[in-house]
Amino acid sequence: MIKINMKNVGFKIIFLFALVFGFSSQAQTKKWTLKECVDYALKNNISIKQSELDLKISDVEKMEAVGNFLPTLNGNANFSVNTGASINPVTNQFQNETFQSFSAGLNSSVNLFNGLVNWKTLQRSKLNKIANSYRLDKMKDDIALSIANSYLQILFNKEQLKVQKNQNSITKENIIRTQKLIDAGSLPAGDIYELQATDATQQQQIIGTENTLLISKIALCQTLLIEEYSTFDVSDVPVDVPVSSVINETQASILAKAKESVKDIKIATSNVEIAKKDLAISKSSYLPTLSGFIGYNTRWSENPFFNFIDQLSLFDGTAVGAQLNVPIFNGFATKGRVKRAKINQERTEFQLKQAELDLERNVYQAYNDVVNAGKSFEAAQKSLEARKQAFNFSKERYNVGLMNAFDFSQSTIALENAQSEVLRTKYDYVFKTKVLEFYFGIPIIENK
């Protein structure tokens, strides 16, 4: 009989529960860093996956373009049972009887000249792959920038929530203190009503900010394709005010850097080169084409004088030659393709010019945004310091009965608004600095 030590079993069960619960809690309380969010999105985002498929298609197009230089090789075979008056493929005479026949052949052709279409098509496929690479990189940059914005929005909402809860705690403490003074007869009973109204307003603001925080988390989850909205959270890392040397650069130097690093110009330039190749390919249709060919064929039919193998060797043949095609008139089809290609080239050139203008406007706008955001942040800090002093003064007056509850509540609200404005301008300045650095070629997320 096997004896079971229930004490040890119980300990093991408790240990397993603790182990499983510990892993579960760790999974639920995981807090994502900004780099983790960006890396995860770059691996799982649907738009990026689709763009990666476009890049694979470019490889297929290049393979096909290389294949156009190679000769073709095709084989054929035919077996038939003939009844009635039919031509015997071996004797080439009519036979009014049932007989079987077989034929087979092997043919190869090679392009000798077609206006360099194959070469131009190969060059086009290389350009298209480069353009698709730029599109993929641009999509990654856009997603990283979007995630950084969403991430900072979550951190802002968290800090905003802390400020509101802290202010509400102060209000609740004042309510308790005021109630004691009312009970002692030092203050009239009406003084507590304004504080209670302020408490209710602050609780409403807390609920609104909690909802805003949840929505901002859901937005980031959807970008990352994460469905666990309720357990998702980001790391509560302190966000310092950036000290960026880019702001010391001239707008012209930032624009020059942007033209080298931002993919919009590179994509537009690649599209112009592709359009030029399309025009050259279309014009090649005006030129004659020359191809060479070689073929081998053999045949067999029922014949009392020759067996199968003998007929295959006796009635085989080869053909070698060249074919020249000279375009004379095709209903303006070639002319139409050339004109369409010219129009498309002009369109891509306009798009390149527009992309350059857009980039110039965006860079100058980003530069001015950073300058103005920095000034707004400094002004908000000065305003907060003034509000703190005003609040402390009001608190002292309220404590000695020289200020009523309404005026003190207004001072509290003004301080809370000043704190919120500092947070808003701070995160606005951080994000806009990131955008300007991005135009200067500094990655949104450093790969460390």
Image (spheres, rainbow, N blue to C red):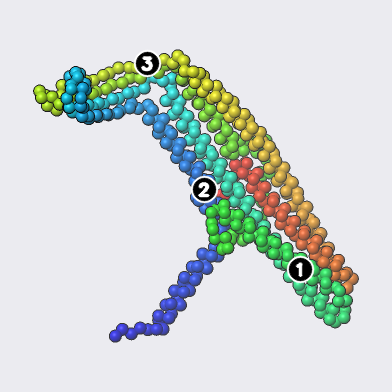
Residue 76 visible in the picture? yes
Q: Amino acid at mark 2?
A: Ile
Residue 258 percent location from the top left of the image = 62, 38
In which image quadrant can residue 265 be found?
top right
Q: Residues within 10 Å of mark 3 (few under 14, many from 20)?
A: few
Give the spatial CA distance, label 1 vs label 3: 91 Å
Q: Which residue is mark 3?
A: 324
Q: Secondary structure at mark 1?
A: helix
Q: Position of residue 332 (x, y in %)?
A: 50, 18
Is residue 312 something one can see in this rendering?
A: no
Q: Disc 3 residue type?
A: Leu
**How many labels sit on residues?**
3
Q: Which residue is mark 2?
A: 46
Which of labels 2 and 3 is toward the front?
3
Give the residue displayed 45% in from the left and 27% down from the top.
Answer: 121
Sequence order check, earlier mark of 1 and 3: 1
- Quadrant housing residue 151: bottom right
Q: Which mark is residue 200?
A: 1
Residue nearest the observer in this picture, 69 or 163? 69
On the image, the x and y values in percent for residue 364 come to: 69, 39
